[in-house]
Amino acid sequence: AFPGNVNSDGVVRHELQHPVIARYVRIVPLDWNGEGRIGLRIEVYGCSYWADVINFDGHVVLPYRFRNKKMKTLKDVIALKFKTSESEGVILHGEGQQGDYITLELKKAKLVLSLNLGSNQLGPIYGHTSVMTGSLLDDHHWHSVVIERQGRSINLTLDRSMQHFRTNGEFDYLDLDYEITFGGIPFSGKPSSSGRKNFKGCMESINYNGINITDLARRKKLEPSNVGNLSFSCVEPYTVPVFFNATSYLEVPGRLNQDLFSVSFQFRTWNPNGLLVFSHFADNLGNVEIDLTESKVGVHINITQTKMSQIDISSGSGLNDGQWHEVRFLAKENFAILTIDGDEASAVRTNSPLQVKTGEKYFFGGFLNQMNNSSHSVLQPSFQGCMQLIQVDDQLVNLYEVAQRKPGSFANVSIDMCAIIDRCVPNHCEHGGKCSQTWDSFRCTCDETGYSGATCHNSIYEPSCEAYKHLGQTSNYYWIDPDGSGPLGPLKVYCNMTEDKVWTIVSHDLQMQTNVVAYNPEKYSVTQLVYSASMDQISAITDSAEYCEQYVSYFCKMSRLLNTPDGSPYTWWVGKANEKHYYWGGSGPGIQKCACGIERNCTDPKYYCNCDADYKQWRKDAGFLSYKDHLPVSQVVVGDTDRQGSEAKLSVGPLRCQGDRNYWNAASFPNPSSYLHFSTFQGETSADISFYFKTLTPWGVFLENMGKEDFIKLELK
């Protein structure tokens, strides 16, 4: 949809994202100009275009064989365009004997890229990576795909929306053997090749690392597989969809007075409920209604002869997932069967007493309005969605004839288009909220995310321990969300409120007085600390805190610590940003000393740490690390424990922070003319403003943002 002009002679130019190859252009006005007359003048610009199109019939596979039987690449660029009406199919595939593979395929009309740069069968390296993008790609429109890989870093672009990700595992090279195939996986007898459908549809401009595959195929330089046919013009599908909105119906004539009632069609929708088909039997025998009810298909047969009895059968589940689903229903004397998606095994049969004589009209998707209130009550509202391949009494309905109202009638339907859109792709639900949709709207389920609101945007937790104290809470464990509605999730901390200042305490898994033993050949002992929160979350706490500290203590017997006064340190710790630090508790950055070296009270004044004197008795160096830009301690490496008689014990306390700069950044407005001025507020699609206030005056403006047309004003009245 694009805007037209607002006057009689202004030119509005609209660039299409992709060139369209067409013989006809249909323009559907969506909205009229409020003033003036309706009129249209249009120019269509051509563009230089050459494309080699390949049509895949669902059987044929096009392989590109490598010259040297193997292909080892650090960098790949694969580009192609595809167009299909099928929701499943392998677009390209390559694999190697070392476990490497790359597969691009359609699954449920979404595009899935699976990639493995190598797994280690024995060790813990797991390389499989899978990424999904797009939706409803079986719409028989052209879609362009570009895969750009540099080592483990990948950009996957579908129709100009790019997704960036890194592969799992530790390998950078993609090792493929013999060939890469387009349109499917060649049958090799391997379990990976079976069970996946080949691609059925068209591709053009296939480019693999600078090699024009479509051109090679056109010039017969590539040998397609011997099953199926490869052709070089795009075959149009014979299906004609019809689109229903909430007020539509489609009336189709049937064959009167047959003793076999049969109807079949495919539909797609997001709504769990809707009327699919309704028809009266002849001779006033009753009627048949086929519904979508709570995303199952149900058939209700009302029999008027035998004291208004009813036959109900239903089948299927989750049929409002936006995919095409096939319904086949057949009824004859004392027998009826309902089949969904061609699954004969789970077809539902009934042998209830039944007399069948087909009527002359079948209504799809809804009714004529005046019929609604008179002769029958319908169980379900009108259908919103699309149907195709409608068959009545074993005859395929020609929708083009219906469109000319030759047989039958209709209202508010669009023939030869399916206006389905996926409101959950891209997902507007934040923080891992689950998106579900109907035809008209979507909603987010925020359970267990820690957020609430229409799009799971607002944190349900306070931003800090200070805020909990302000609410009158006492010392306890609390969930806090330091960046509010930002991307970081909530974390659990202990809030100590016994003093005036509130302490936020983040714990880790290291026991106090842990014995330090060197296992590895470098004779270093590495102690890793695992915190109850991610490093990003802890950074959010330390960044907003006034002051942070972490207690460290080293208990030693013949185990030197920093090797003062001028040796290179045996022990160091790793803090934020993975930097090594060579100072100990009680000292500061860049000063290679312990607390006793700063206070000049070490047991041996020649050294700056008690442990560096290398005594055979137990000694201790301890103190607080309080340079908050280096905290928290994530790893401690101890070097001098491998000699005879050497022993050491390590303790690291929890991270403790106090003061919340975001909370106590107060400003006073002493008189009516005082104000704070910030640059214009750019809200885009979402923005948060929050503040605390206290005042004695009953009125006043808190904030206002004067835009040209949009504005916000918040005041006390």
Image (cartoon, rainbow, N blue to C red):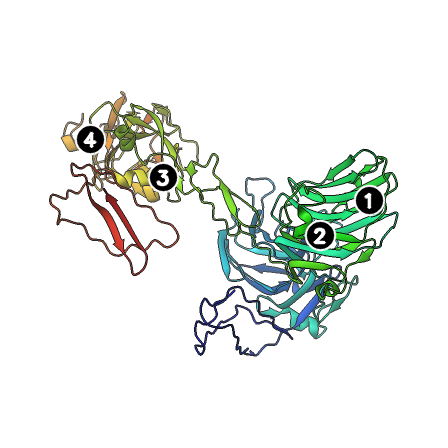
Whether pointer 3 and pointer 1 mark residues with C-beta atoms closer than 8 Å, the reply is: no
Task: Please state which amino acid type lies under the numbered disc 1.
Answer: Asn
Residue nearest the viewer, comparing 676 with 202: 676
Q: CA distance from mark 3 to mark 1?
A: 71 Å
Q: Earlier in the sequence, mark 4 or mark 3?
A: 3
Residue lying furthest left in this view? 671
Horizontal side of 91 relative to 561 (left or right) equals: right
Residue 712 point in image, percent of width and height? 29, 51
Reply above or below: 40 against 706. Answer: below
Residue 620: image quadrant is top left
Task: Please state which amino acid type lies under the numbered disc 2.
Answer: Phe
Residue nearest the viewer, comparing 170 with 162: 162
- Identify the element where label 2 is drawn: strand
Neighbor class of circle 4 (other Cα within 10 Å; few <14, some 14-19, many 20+) is many
Residue 185 visible to an observer of this rendering: no
Neighbor class of circle 3 (other Cα within 10 Å; few <14, some 14-19, many 20+) is some
Taking the spot 82% from the left edge, 49% from the top edge, the residue there is 262
Q: Which residue is mark 4?
A: 595
The disc at residue 537 is 3
Q: CA distance from mark 1 to mark 4?
A: 100 Å
Whether pointer 2 and pointer 1 mark residues with C-beta atoms closer than 8 Å, the reply is: no
Neighbor class of circle 1 (other Cα within 10 Å; few <14, some 14-19, many 20+) is few
Residue lying furthest front in this view? 374
Whether pointer 4 and pointer 3 mark residues with C-beta atoms closer than 8 Å, the reply is: no
Q: CA distance from mark 4 to mark 3?
A: 30 Å
- Identify the element where label 3 is drawn: helix
- Identify the element where label 1 is drawn: helix
Q: Earlier in the sequence, mark 1 or mark 4?
A: 1
Residue 103 point in image, percent of width and height? 62, 54
